[in-house]
């Protein structure tokens, strides 16, 4: 058993397919250069977690690891350090679950496979999100770009995508942390809407699927499709689903008036803010100047960073 291990796992941005992916439609997702780091050190006895705010997710991850591997483990000091904004659609809890799963498997049985990590992290993600598609933990495990579909609870089909175009003219604008959690958006709001109006919601999901496939052809450079049209169409569908707040819609309309396109990414939010907004504009400098003028918080992002990996001990 190694005396210590340090690992990191990336957050994600859903390019297209959020919510629909919970119902078996495809999603196209990219890892980002924002990462969560976990370091585990063997100590004599007990469990020490730093910072203590991470207690719940770490304890759940350990409980799942013990069950998954059929071994009890004691005597760990676990340190978490994440750059991924929490609860904003950037896959922060999934990245923590993945980094923790990788580090725990390494500490407990000294050998890991990405398949094991993905499966174990999915159990922890389920505790938080109730009915996740699993796309967040899969992209954080494997990194890069994934085409992802959940066929059944235990059977998920995904494939790495190698883009033939550079996806560079994007920034992430923070519309603010949603009042609702992902679990509320997925398991109460969208699921309630689906139960009341199955045909209407299936129609929205089919439209989202068309856009997701268009996005795939765009990044593979197989067709001359307008990225602006794809993102705008995607956002309109998410608005029909009711997962975008009025405040966020206003922000997105302003970006569109400037000649850009924007969509929420992740579960969204209805009442207050809707988390991270993925914004595209051909003239990134012009966009940034205006975002600054509007006093909006935005972040540069790089897509496609590597999945869960070892870090040098620091
Ligand atoms: O907001 P996030 O990062 O938890 O993204 C959730 C994406 C959903 O499609 C809404 C849910 C899921 O499990 O796929």
Image (cartoon, rainbow, N blue to C red):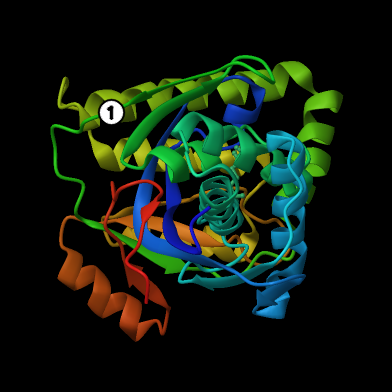
- Of 100 and 257, nearer the camera is 100
In which quadrant of this rendering is ligand 1 seen?
Answer: top right
Q: Is residue 223 left or right of residue 202?
A: left
Mark 1 residue CB less than 8 A from any atom of ligand 1: no
Q: Label 1: state its secondary structure.
A: loop
Vertical side of 126 occupied by 52: above or below: below
Task: Identify the residue position indicated by label 1 in the image.
Answer: 161
- Of 59 and 284, nearer the camera is 59
Residue at x 66% of width, y 19% of height: 154
Residue 304, visible in the rendered structure: yes
Residue at x 13% of width, y 32% of height: 164
Vertical side of 176 occupied by 245: above or below: above
Q: Quadrant of residue 226?
A: top left
Residue 256, visible in the rendered structure: no
Q: Is residue 122 left or right of residue 6?
A: right
- Of 220 and 49, nearer the camera is 49
Where is residue 305? Give x, y as percent.
29, 51
Q: Give the tally of numbered discs.
A: 1
Residue at x 70% of width, y 75% of height: 48
Q: Is residue 308 left or right of residue 138?
A: left
Vertical side of 92 occupied by 222: above or below: above
Q: Is residue 8 left or right of residue 134?
A: left
**Quadrant holding the C terminus:** bottom left
Where is residue 220? Give x, y as percent.
19, 26
Q: Quadrant of residue 280?
A: bottom left
Where is residue 97? Give x, y as percent.
60, 51
- Of 51 and 223, nearer the camera is 51
Vertical side of 220 occupied by 247: above or below: below
Residue at x 60% of width, y 16% of height: 155
Where is residue 87? Give x, y as percent.
63, 62
Q: Label 1 crowding class (10 Å Cα cut-off): few <14, some 14-19, many 20+?
A: some
């Amino acid at each position: 058993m190694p005396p210590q291990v340090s690992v990191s796992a990336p957050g994600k941005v859903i390019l297209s397919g959020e919510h629909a992916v919970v119902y078996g439609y495809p999603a196209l997702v990219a890892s980002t250069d924002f990462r969560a780091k976990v370091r585990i050190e063997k100590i004599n006895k007990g469990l020490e977690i730093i910072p203590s705010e991470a207690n719940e997710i770490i304890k759940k991850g350990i409980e799942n690891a013990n069950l998954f591997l059929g071994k009890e483990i004691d005597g760990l000091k676990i340190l978490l350090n994440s750059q991924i904004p929490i609860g904003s659609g950037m896959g922060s809890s999934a990245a923590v679950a993945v980094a923790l799963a990788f580090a725990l498997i390494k500490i407990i049985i000294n050998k890991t496979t990405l398949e094991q990590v993905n499966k174990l992290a999915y159990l922890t993600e389920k505790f938080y999100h109730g009915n996740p598609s699993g796309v967040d933990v899969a992209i954080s495990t494997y990194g890069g770009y994934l085409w992802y579909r959940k066929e059944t609870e235990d059977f998920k089909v995904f494939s790495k995508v190698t883009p033939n175009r550079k996806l560079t003219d994007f920034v992430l604008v923070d519309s603010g942390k949603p009042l609702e959690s992902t679990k509320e958006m997925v398991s109460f709001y969208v699921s309630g809407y689906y139960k009341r109006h199955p045909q209407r919601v299936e129609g929205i999901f089919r439209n989202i699927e068309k856009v997701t496939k268009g996005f795939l052809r765009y990044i593979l450079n197989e067709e001359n499709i307008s990225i602006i049209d794809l993102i705008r169409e995607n956002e309109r569908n998410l608005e029909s689903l009711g997962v975008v707040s009025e405040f966020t819609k206003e922000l997105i309309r302003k970006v569109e008036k400037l000649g850009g396109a924007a969509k929420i990414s992740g579960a969204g939010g209805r009442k207050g803010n809707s988390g991270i907004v993925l914004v595209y504009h051909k003239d990134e400098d012009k966009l940034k100047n205006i975002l600054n003028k509007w006093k909006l918080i935005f972040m540069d992002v790089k897509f496609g960073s590597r999945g869960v990996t070892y870090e040098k001990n620091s």
